[in-house]
Amino acid sequence: MMIKIHDIKPIVQIPDLSIYLYYSVVFLLCVVILASFYLLYKFLKPKEKTQEKIFYEKMQNLDFVNVKKTAYEITKYGNFLAKEERSILLLEELTNELEAYKYKKEIPSEFSVKVKTQYSIFMDSLDVR
């Protein structure tokens, strides 16, 4: 038989939330680590070239030996790259000058100084990012 002592109280359970706190800290730490890896990957990943950058590089590397082909390529790529009012106006002027090198059987063997100057001004006016 067990004797009950009146001075001693029975064992009481104390709610312990430390395990939930531990799991939440571990979860947040994992989220922060994954987010930092993702941001590091996005930062260090090589950037893909846009169509605009590809056309701009083609415009910079045009072969001025074949005058007729070059005149067509300047018009083609220039129409795609000219977006601001100034560059559109410069392209229109350049295109008007290039008509002497297009649509004809007999064309000059090289571009005039005026066309080359307008081409360089047009290339300087482009803003490619």
Image (cartoon, helix red, strand yellow):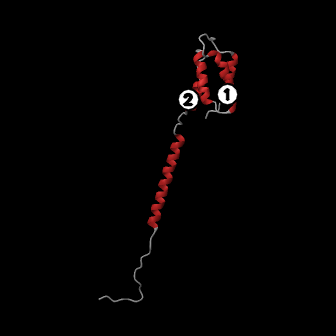
Tag 1: amino acid: Asp
| Residue at figure coordinates x 69%, y 20% from the top left | 117
Spatial distance from mark 2 to mark 1, Cα to Cα?
16 Å
Q: Where residue 87 sits in the image (x, y, percent)?
A: 67, 29
Tag 2: amino acid: Ile
| Residue at figure coordinates x 64%, y 30% from the top left | 82
Packing grade of label 2 (10 A; few <14, some 14-19, many >=20) is few
Q: Which residue is mark 1?
A: 124
Q: Earlier in the sequence, mark 2 or mark 1?
A: 2
Q: Where residue 93 sits in the image (x, y, percent)?
A: 69, 23
Assign a secondary structure to mark 1.
helix
Q: Where residue 57 sits in the image (x, y, percent)?
A: 58, 27
Q: Where residue 66 sits in the image (x, y, percent)?
A: 58, 15
Q: Residue furthest front?
A: 103
> Is 23 in front, or is 121?
121
Q: Which residue is mark 2?
A: 54
Q: Residue furthest left?
A: 1
| Residue at figure coordinates x 51%, y 50% from the top left | 35
The reply to whether the C-beta atoms of the residues labelled 2 and 1 are less than 8 Å apart is no
Query: Where on the picture, by quarter, is residue 74?
Result: top right
Q: Quadrant of the C terminus?
A: top right
Q: Residue furthest top?
A: 106
- As displayed, is residue 48 above or below residue 12? above
Left or right position of 33 against 105? left
- As displayed, is residue 51 above or below residue 39? above
- As displayed, is residue 70 above or below residue 79? above
Left or right position of 16 against 59? left
